[in-house]
Image (spheres, rainbow, N blue to C red):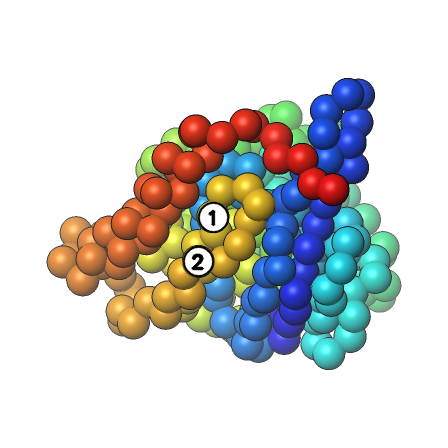
Amino acid sequence: MIEVSNLTKTFPARNGAPAVLALDNVDVAQKDGEFLAVMGPSGCGKTTLLNIVAGFETPESGTCKVADRIVTRAGPDRGVVFQEYGLFPWMTVERNIVFAMKAAKQWDRDGLKRAHDILSRMGLINFTKAFPKNLSGGMRQRVAIARILAINSPVMLMDEPFGALDALTRHVLQRELIDLWTETRKTILFITHSSEEAVYLADRVLVMTARPGRIVLDMPIELERPRDPTEARFNAYKRRILDVINPSLTEAATKPELRSVS
């Protein structure tokens, strides 16, 4: 479903700062319906990778394909959930969903009923007329996920969607996301800073080095769901991730924040 080959991305020099090599020869192959988590140190290029798959940015070299088509721009086949929700603050919950459906050409005479069905499924049916500012962080993320369901995107790109939430709300939404994925089998690319979140959610975890971002670990998570974070095998997977990531953190701390490229 998602195929990234020999991907390199450099951000040009700006305001006296040198150019930055963000991604260096990255390869990712994600199967249809697979839940793939990507983690690594801050600034390693995780979000840049997601933005290229989403069509928000273009690579310097290499290719990115979704469903065998080269990505050249954003499209409704790839729904994105951001850490900061990405909702229109001047629109109600209902209008946010309806707007997305119309923009994706998923609107018809039954559109409002489908929107309400999805909001009901996400526990939001009593908040259709509420504005985002009146919702908790967890509820805002439910709206963002509902928006992707409403436009029927086969691919969900999630950029640390639960990172700003308290621990209890985060765990509730993690469980809800697994239930949703089990039911729909959407292809999910999930960016996270948390080894526990990666092991809890994903079929497979990719670990990236500090800038420039490279894939240094590709690890299937062979645990049945629902997963227990206190179980020994669960924690063995976490230790394996941290064993790989900690040297990269040390390297990042002992080199310049920006890396020049010629």
In the rendered image, the residue lying farthest to the top is: 16
Q: Disc 2 or 1, which lies upstream in sequence?
A: 1
* Residue at (78% x, 65% y) in the render: 71
- Decide: few, some or many residues near mark 2? Use Cα within 10 Å; few <14, some 14-19, many ≥20: some
Q: Is residue 122 left or right of residue 260?
A: left
Secondary structure under the numbered disc 2 in the rendered image: strand
Q: Amino acid at mark 2?
A: Val
Quadrant of the image containing the C terminus: top right
Where is residue 11 shown, x and y percent of the image?
A: 74, 40
Q: Which residue is mark 2?
A: 216
Q: Position of residue 73 (x, y in %)?
A: 83, 58
The residues bearing labels 2 and 1 have C-alpha atoms spaced at a distance of 7 Å
Of 145 and 120, the residue lying toward us: 145
* Identity of the residue drawn at 17% across and 51% down: 230
Residue 4: quadrant of the picture:
bottom right
Look at mark 1 in the image and give the residue it sits on: 209
Taking the image as shown, residue 168 lies to the left or right of residue 131, namely left
- Disc 2 vs disc 1: Cβ atoms closer than 8 Å? yes
Q: Residues within 10 Å of mark 1 (few under 14, many from 20)?
A: many
Q: Quadrant of residue 18?
A: top right
The vertical placement of 260 against 80, above or below, is above
Is residue 171 among the parts visible in the rendering? Answer: no
Residue 53 at x, y percent in the picture: 69, 59
Residue at x-position 65% and y-position 65%: 6
